[in-house]
Image (cartoon, rainbow, N blue to C red):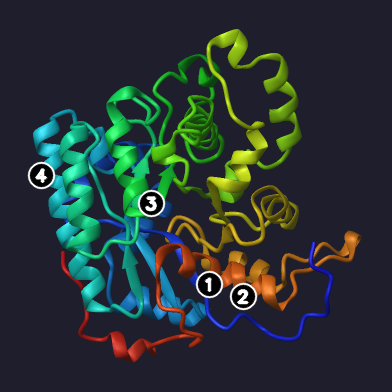
Amino acid sequence: MSMSQPTGRPDRIVTVEEHVLPDFLSEYLDGARSNLDAAYWAESEHKLRDVGYERLADMDAHGVSMQVLSPTAPGIQVEPDPAKATALAARTNDWMAEVVASAPDRFAGFATVALQDPTAAVRELHRAIGELGMVGVLVNGHTGGAYLDEPQYREFLDAVAELEVPLYLHPANAPDAAAWTAGHPQLRGPLFGWGVETAAHFLRLLFSGVFDRTSTSGLTVILGHAGEGLLAAPSRLDSRWRVANAQRHGYRLDHPPSHYLRTNLFVTTSGVTDPLAFWAAVAGAGADRVAMALDYPMEEMGPQLAALRARWRVAELDAAADDDLLDRVAWRNISELLGLPMSSDSVAAEPAAANGVPGPR
């Protein structure tokens, strides 16, 4: 924990799990609408659709310099027709490129791919990164019950690693959670189940040896929500791996599991205001592998940014982030990872500057 005397506020704030909704993806949101409070969802959906004045004004009001945007879950990954999903991925990336172009100093974007057709997903990934300027790729959990450690996705993971962009694993409902959520449907969604599904997805990649393969050893996977619980006790992953591991189940690793948390995992704070969760992320992944995210508009900006500006202080431990760590988490780490401008301007535009920039629909 950083103990030196803090002297200032972050120079800049860049947030990286910020969601949008193009009109043509609305058909995939029935599950979200049915599982969430109606008033909450109505307000959230309004903000998801706005990529102009209101969003920029909200960012300015909270001192957010830039958002890295992605379509809200589940997106096209629940589309059963591979051809339709592939076409929608291209349309989504074209739309995202227009949004970013409307305010390039305020927005960047993650690519969308249709993993229903892994070969087409590789082609679209190259187009989105190489031609449209997307800064990474975001995947909403499994695709029809298939996870990224499965053989059909090897070429896709190789392509992500070759392009030297990160893969953001965003939560989704687990396909087989019926037993442990029976009678408690709230467990399936963002309250708990999403984190379990996403943490398990990362561990599938880890335990299948993806990070030991030469072609994907440098792959960076981003997890939100302070690491989806994986960083609470890395030592237990190591100790249990020693007794329930590859030699028993047919898998081998070059290193203990906690090694990959420090070399292949990058963590964001989306939706988390708990200082101890933040410090667990810093300790488990490293001070240069943690970044700020707000999960906008599904979470409120204010409390999360208050935690940042309070330097994730833990009074009982007399611990708080020093200026260097504050800047790393607020903007520097993610800017280095995604190749974003390394500007120190706190806010690049006033709300009025966004007027007349409604963004594409």
Q: Say which of marks 4 and 2 sits in front.
A: 2
Q: Quadrant of residue 309?
A: bottom right
Q: Earlier in the sequence, mark 1 or mark 4?
A: 4
Q: CA distance from mark 1 to mark 3?
A: 29 Å
Q: Earlier in the sequence, mark 2 or mark 3?
A: 3
Q: Which residue is mark 1?
A: 331
Q: Position of residue 335 (x, y in %)?
A: 46, 70
Q: Which residue is mark 4?
A: 87
Q: Position of residue 141 (x, y in %)?
A: 39, 36
Instruction: State which quarter of the image contains the N terminus.
Output: bottom right
- The residue at 37%/28% (across/down) is 147
The answer to whether residue 264 is above or below residue 43 is above
Q: Position of residue 144 (x, y in %)?
A: 29, 25
Q: Say which of marks 3 and 4 sits in front.
A: 4
Q: CA distance from mark 2 to mark 3?
A: 33 Å
Q: What's the residue type where badge 4 is placed?
A: Ala
